[in-house]
Image (cartoon, rainbow, N blue to C red):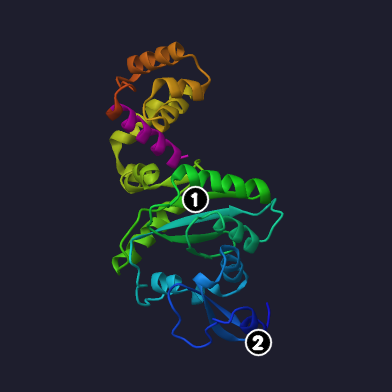
Amino acid sequence: MPSLAELQLLFPTLITQPPFPIDSVVFSVDTKQVAIPTHDLTSRESALLTALNGNHENHNPWYQFLNANAAAPQMAHPVRLIYFTVDFAQAQASSASWLAALQELFTQTVTSYFIDATHGVIIEEETSTNPSLDDLDGMIQTVDGELYTKTSLYVGHFWAVNQQLVAIVHEEQALAAMSHTRPVTTLQHQALRFYTQSHRPTSPILTQLTADLAALDDDYLTIITTLYNHQGNLSSAAKALYLHRNTLQYRLDKFQDLTGFSLRQMDDLVFCYLLVLHQESTH
């Protein structure tokens, strides 16, 4: 890390005394806390300064707000938090380089920090150019392909910035921590698993029906999950399962004969997927 004097030459707008603006990168140099306005930094410079600073999460205004009872940042628009998990086992780059590479792909200014060695958040304000889920999927594929990392994202909703956001973020962190197979997940993907987990273990109905399901061919578990992930679309599910559509139709007819549930009906499909989740949680 350059000295304070060197940084002042490189960044004339360096702020050496608090209070620091919300839209700034706060870090420590020569045992002194300083900040640089975000608009005076490139995305790569911002990410590198944030990640290289060992205690960045303690100084980041968003971290202070969400974890240390500090005042809410003043924002003109709602924000969303994107929670990332990165596997650096085969990586050919540091966490700082990884964060810089990802942040550079955003078209608007974002705030980001690591919570620990492999987890962190990106905070972006709502604009007309926020990346879609498909865009985010492409972004992490790009970074992972270049740096040999493996990244997954949980993408939160856009929320107003107020004190209620603290509780919302804590719940989103719990949703983000759940195991999942998608590289990019949202509340919609995790809600059924998350909001039923406390009731499933005590239900005799679910327990019995799950046992009945487990007694069937294991292929049915895959069929239910795939059909659910494809919103009940038989053609796309059959393609994902490498089955002819007529073969899948036959399997669904047989499943209905055995269980009484029609996987062509969305209510039945969602309920059977809940049984799959219950079986996974008990094994």
Residue 148 visible in the current orientation: no
- Residue underneath mark 1: 153
Answer left or right for 169 relative to 86: left
Going by the numbered disc 2, the residue's amino acid type is Ala
Q: If the image is split into quadrants, where does the N terminus sit?
A: bottom right
- Residue underneath mark 2: 5
> N-terminal of the two: label 1 or label 2?
2
Overall secondary structure of the magenta section: helix
Element type at marker 2? Answer: helix
Q: Nearer the viewer, residue 267 or 183?
A: 183
Q: Nearer the viewer, residue 184 or 222?
A: 184
Q: Is residue 38 magenta?
A: no
Marks 1/2 in contact by CB < 8 Å: the verdict is: no
Q: Nearer the viewer, residue 129 or 178?
A: 129
Going by the numbered disc 1, the residue's amino acid type is Leu
x%, y% of residue 207?
34, 35
x%, y% of residue 154?
45, 51
- Which stretch is magenta? 268-283
Tell me the crowding category of disc 1: few under 14, some 14 to 19, or many 20 or more residues within 10 angstroms, Cα based.
Answer: many
When the figure is inspected, residue 129 is found, relative to residue 204, above or below; the finding is below
When the figure is inspected, residue 65 is found, relative to residue 209, above or below; the finding is below
